[in-house]
Structures are given as structure tokens and as C-alpha cells.
Image: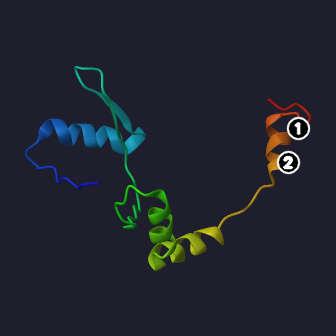
Amino acid sequence: MKTVVISSRSKTLRALLKQARKNGLILQSPEGERFVLAPIGDWQVFDVGESEDFAEEVKATSQNKELIKFLKERHTHGKRILIKKVRERLGLDQSTKE
């Protein structure tokens, strides 16, 4: 993904960015294409290669030390909720399978 710096003279884009800061926006082109404009906070990017071969991508991803460290740190933070509790809260019956 590429970063594009918006000029301070671009009033329309700056107005859109101001709106997006609050709730995010969906921008729609005249052709009907939709794009999301939303703040991303502490965005982190990890290079894992550009291979078309899935096995190579898996290997490259698993060898990315920075990514693995990030995932381990993230894994240890936050409260966990058992799926059973989530189903109970949502009123979902575990006996029915679709």
C-alpha cells in the first residue's frame, strides 16, 4: 500500500479527512466504486514477499521475525472470552448447526 501526502492547499481532501477522523467515510466514485477512508491509528506493515505460491508466502511469513514478535505480543494482551460465553451472550443455541 502506498502513502500519499495531502497538500494543505487541497481543501476538498482536507475536508474529507476531517470528516473521516470522526466516523470514517465510504467514498463512492461516479462509476459506483466504493472506497473506505478511515483513520488507521498505529498502523504496522510487515513485508512477507510477493510470491504467487501460497507455500512460499506461508514460509516467508513464518520467517518474518518482526511479524512473529508482534503477533506474540498481541496474543498475550487483552481479555479472552470463551466461545461458549459469546454464544450465551448472543442467545445462540449450540445444539443447532447450520
Task: Farthest residue to the right: give it.
Answer: 95
Q: Which residue is mark 2?
A: 84
Type of amino acid at the residue the image marks with label 2: Lys
Secondary structure beneath label 1: loop
Marks 1,2: beta carbons within 8 A: yes
Secondary structure beneath label 2: helix
Pick the front one: 33 or 87:
33
In the figure, is residue 80 to the left or right of 67?
right
Q: Which residue is mark 1?
A: 94
Q: In the rendered image of this protein, does residue 98 appear above or below residue 60?
A: above
In the figure, is residue 35 to the left or right of 92?
left
Pick the front one: 33 or 12:
33
Q: Quadrant of the C terminus?
A: top right
In the figure, is residue 64 to the left or right of 79?
left
Residue 64 image position (x, y, % from top left): 45, 75
Instruction: Please tell me which residue is depicted at 81% across the width and 54% down the height of the picture.
Output: 82
Q: Which of the 4 image quarters holds residue 41?
A: bottom left
Q: Quadrant of the N terminus?
A: bottom left
Point out the tag, 1 or 2, that comes first from the N-terminus. 2
Residue 19 image position (x, y, % from top left): 32, 38
